[in-house]
Structure formats: C-alpha cells, structure tokens
Image (spheres, helix red, strand yellow):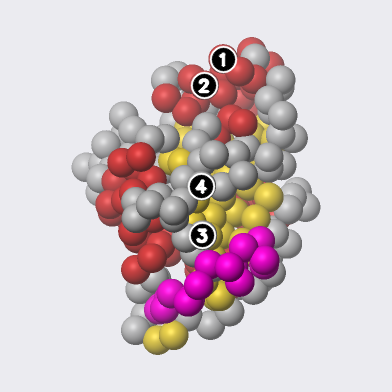
C-alpha cells in the first residue's frame, strides 16, 4: 500500500474541524479514469493512512472481503432480513441467525458479535443503526459505528469491513450517512486502536461515489 501511495502522485489535503488532520497521510489510489480507481480485486477504491490504520472506501461485496469481521446493519431484534443482512444469512448459513436468536436483541446504537458461519471471516458484528425520522439519528448512527469498532478491538481483530449502515430500508440519506460514518471512524482511529484496516464497503457505484467524495473532502 505504501508503494501504491508513492505512485499516486501528489497528496490530497485532509482537514478536521478546520485544522490539518493529524496522523492522516492521504494515499488516494489514483484512477485510470476520472471516476474511479481499481484495487487488486477489481473494486473501486480510495484510501488514506491514519497512524497505523488504513481507512479504505471501496465498492464491492462485503461478504467476500479479506477481513476478520464484517458489520451487519442489524435491526434491534437481530433478525437477518433483506439487503446486507440477507446476503449474510444466505452465504453464512442459519447458524448466524441461531446465534442472534440466543442473544435476543440489542438497542439502537449498540452492537453484538457472532460467528460468521460459512463466510470466510471470523466474526459478524451486528450494529443497530437508526431509522430515519426517529430522532437524534446522527448520534445514534455514530454510536452504532463506534460500538462495532470497539467490539472488534475488544476481540483483538486487525481488520473490519463496514457497510453504509442505516441507508437501506432504514432510509438514512446516503450523503449524510457518509459524513457521519466516516467522521466517526476517523474519530475512533485517532483515539488509538489495534485495527490495521477499516474498509467501508459500498454496494454500487452511486453509493461508492458519495462516500469517496466525502473522504476526499476530509473530516470536519
């Protein structure tokens, strides 16, 4: 990744709260075409180095990422329904839902961990984000993301993939979710972590474009 950063050309300015972002060394993976770049897997990808952690935004299938844990955008009942949760259930098998049933549920803004069944990673972290319109949505989404990252740290994990939590049937606007999720990831990584890679994995070019633009704008 360091070699890719050197070949990427000039660095992008990244700011936080109106000041230069400390500890963040932007290593945008330059596209061959203006719209996107390609990672080793063929996914569109942009990344920045933050202290000892690589933060990536990419387009792809979260269930196939080479990470130790993926985040399921769960509901409070931990029922694996449609969208990302449905893909996790289909590919990981019934054992994940059975483990969720034993846990019983978790409130908005919190997260729990299960095994990953037949998926290639070790764990699934089920983070419950808010429904748009229920009130205090930004704080609740931040809390869900923070809970997922903290749970990964408590389990000694080095890599995690996070989807666009709350944006699907929960109705959270994509551009606002991008700002909230990336800001919370940045804030968490600045506090010290064992995580070496945090990948925000988006489904489709439109979602990727929104998150990539937000990452390029920097943190506020």
Q: Are marks 4 and 3 in contact (CB under 8 Å)?
A: yes
- Residue placed under numbered mark 4 in the picture: 38
Name the element at disc 3. Answer: loop
Q: Quadrant of residue 189?
A: bottom right
Query: Of the residues under marks 4 and 2, which one precedes in the sequence?
Result: 4
Query: Of the residues under marks 4 and 3, which one precedes in the sequence?
Result: 3
Rendered location of residue 98, percent (x, y): 65, 17
Please identify the quadrant where the C terminus is shown.
bottom left
Q: Does 124 sit above or below residue 162?
A: above
Q: Are marks 4 and 2 in contact (CB under 8 Å)?
A: no
- Left or right: residue 194 versus residue 112 is right
Instruction: Identify the residue at horizontal 56%, vertical 24% (top origin).
Output: 88
| Residue 200 in sight | no
Q: Are marks 1 and 2 in contact (CB under 8 Å)?
A: yes
- Residue placed under numbered mark 2 in the picture: 87
- Residue placed under numbered mark 1 in the picture: 90
Instruction: Identify the residue at horizontal 71%, vertical 20% (top origin).
Output: 118
């Amino acid at each position: 990744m360091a070699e890719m950063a050197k070949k990427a050309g000039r660095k992008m300015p990244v700011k936080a709260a109106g000041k230069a972002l400390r500890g963040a060394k932007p290593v945008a993976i330059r596209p061959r075409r203006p719209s996107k770049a390609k990672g080793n897997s063929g996914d569109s990808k942009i990344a920045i180095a933050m202290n000892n952690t690589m933060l990536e935004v990419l387009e792809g299938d979260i269930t196939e990422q080479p990470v130790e844990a993926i985040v399921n955008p769960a509901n409070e009942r931990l029922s694996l329904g449609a969208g990302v949760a449905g893909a996790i259930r289909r590919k990981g098998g019934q054992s994940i839902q059975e483990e969720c049933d034993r846990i019983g549920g978790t409130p908005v803004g919190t997260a729990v961990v299960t095994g990953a069944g037949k998926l290639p990673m070790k764990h699934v972290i089920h983070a419950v984000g808010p429904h748009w319109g229920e009130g205090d949505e930004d704080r609740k989404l931040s809390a869900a993301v923070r809970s997922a990252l903290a749970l990964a740290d408590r389990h000694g994990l080095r890599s995690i993939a996070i989807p666009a939590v709350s944006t699907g049937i929960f109705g959270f606007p994509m551009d606002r979710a991008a700002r909230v999720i990336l800001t919370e990831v940045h804030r968490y990584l600045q506090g010290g972590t064992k995580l070496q890679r945090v990948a925000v994995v988006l489904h489709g070019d439109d979602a990727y474009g929104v998150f990539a633009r937000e990452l390029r704008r920097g943190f506020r």
